[in-house]
Image: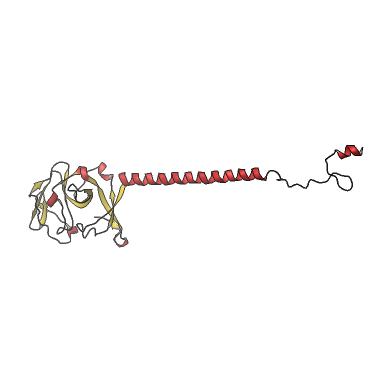
Amino acid sequence: MEGGRGHNDTTRDAGGHPAADTRRPDEGMSDETGRTAERRSEGGILRWVVETAALLLAAFVLAQLIRTFVVQPYVVPTGSMIPTIGIGDRVLANKFVYRFRDPSQGDIIVFDDLTGRTPTLIKRVVATEGQEVDILDGGVYVDGERLSEPYVDGQETQPGPVQLPVTIPPDHVWVMGDNRTNSADSRWIGPQPLSVVEGEAFMTYWPPGRIGRLR
């Protein structure tokens, strides 16, 4: 009988009863559990990286779409629109409004510079297609009537090299800077085609002291 007990590998206490199992519940499983937790952690980091990258890409694409088709900021580098717009002012241009209508007299527009001296120009529309423009006695006349132009701040308007009077051809506008003594506008470059118009400048957003709607 003792020999039979010798083959029994159950641990017993001093009274002959089976002893309690002293092993930790997780003994023998710690390595596998650790590896599983590590894989989960790596998967969470990878998912966060992918989601963040996707979010940034979506934000970039949205910003580019807004910039291309809706609203675009511009920095005004010259004083040709003083006092309405100062040197270094930041303005916003509505890029979709002219998909529904043509520029109107009084609009401030941003357009490509066909002379190639600068990427873009910003001027005020003075006359549209079919209207006749002339400059007499320091004032601008459209269809024989002198314009009221409070935005020029009392400056006189003098003609440039372009021969006047001129009738604006179809799909063109006559543009001039509010700073009439320092603006290379249609008096020098002639009527501008609507095809080069980028949008209507509608507000100044910087510097803070000049924030406001353009008129």
Number of disc labels: 0
Identity of the residue drawn at 20% across and 52% down: 123
Residue 39 located left or right of residue 163: right
Identity of the residue drawn at 29% across and 57% down: 212
Q: Is residue 168 above or below residue 158?
A: above
Q: Is residue 108 visible?
A: no
Could you tell me residue 83's position as x and y percent? 21, 60
Q: Is residue 66 above or below residue 203?
A: above
Could you tell me residue 134's position as x and y percent? 9, 51
Along the line of sight, which residue is nearer the eye, 17 or 186?
A: 17
| Quarter of the figure that contains the C terminus | bottom left
Along the line of sight, which residue is nearer the eye, 109 or 76?
A: 76
Q: Is residue 37 visible?
A: yes
Residue 149 located left or right of residue 28: left
Could you tell me residue 172's position as x and y percent? 16, 44
Q: Is residue 67 above or below residue 154?
A: above
Identity of the residue drawn at 54% across and 45% down: 44
